[in-house]
Image (spheres, helix red, strand yellow):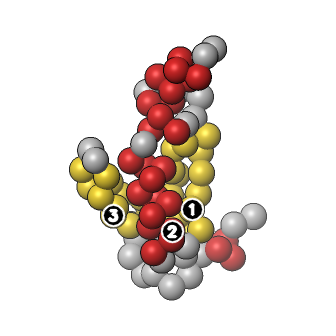
């Protein structure tokens, strides 16, 4: 497939790589915003892990509106 064909599939959720973002600080939020706001990159955010945040979800603004990622635990929970 061509790059354009892959972008079309990625924007529809086909052949995407699932990712977990570590950290919910400024950098973590920017990464979430970029990955969730541009589906054509080929990534789907499964959630995030953070040891300092008590919220169960993290909301970021994207061009398509407010998007939420679930908190999956702390970095120590990753295996």
User: Along the line of sight, which residue is nearer the eye, 60 or 20?
Assistant: 60
Give the residue at the far front of this rendering: 3
Where, by quadrant of the figure, is residue 68 drawn? bottom left
Callout 1 environment at 10 Å: few (<14), some (14 to 19), or many (20+)? many
Give the residue at the far right of this rendering: 79
Q: Name the residue carrying label 3.
A: 59
Q: Identify the residue shown where x is 55% and y is 73%.
A: 23
What is the C-alpha distance between the residues marked 1 and 2?
7 Å
Could you say whether the residue bearing mark 1 is in a helix, strand or loop? strand
Give the residue at the far top of this rendering: 1
Callout 2 environment at 10 Å: few (<14), some (14 to 19), or many (20+)? some
Could you say whether the residue bearing mark 2 is in a helix, strand or loop? helix
Q: Identify the residue shown where x is 45% and y is 81%.
A: 53
Of the 4 image quadrants, the one containing the N terminus is top right
User: Which of disc 1 and disc 3 is earlier in sequence?
Assistant: 1
Q: Is residue 72 visible?
A: no
Of the 4 image quadrants, the one containing the C terminus is bottom right
Q: Name the residue carrying label 1.
A: 21
Camera-nearest label, 1 or 2: 2
Disc 1 vs disc 2: Cβ atoms closer than 8 Å?
Answer: yes
Q: Name the residue carrying label 2.
A: 28
């Amino acid at each position: 497939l061509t790059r354009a064909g892959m972008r079309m599939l990625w924007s529809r959720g086909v052949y995407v790589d699932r990712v977990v973002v570590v950290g919910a600080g400024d950098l973590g939020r920017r990464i979430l915003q970029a990955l969730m706001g541009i589906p054509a990159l080929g990534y789907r955010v499964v959630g995030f892990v953070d040891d300092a945040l008590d919220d169960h979800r993290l909301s970021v603004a994207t061009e398509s509106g407010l998007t939420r990622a679930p908190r999956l635990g702390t970095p120590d929970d990753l295996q």
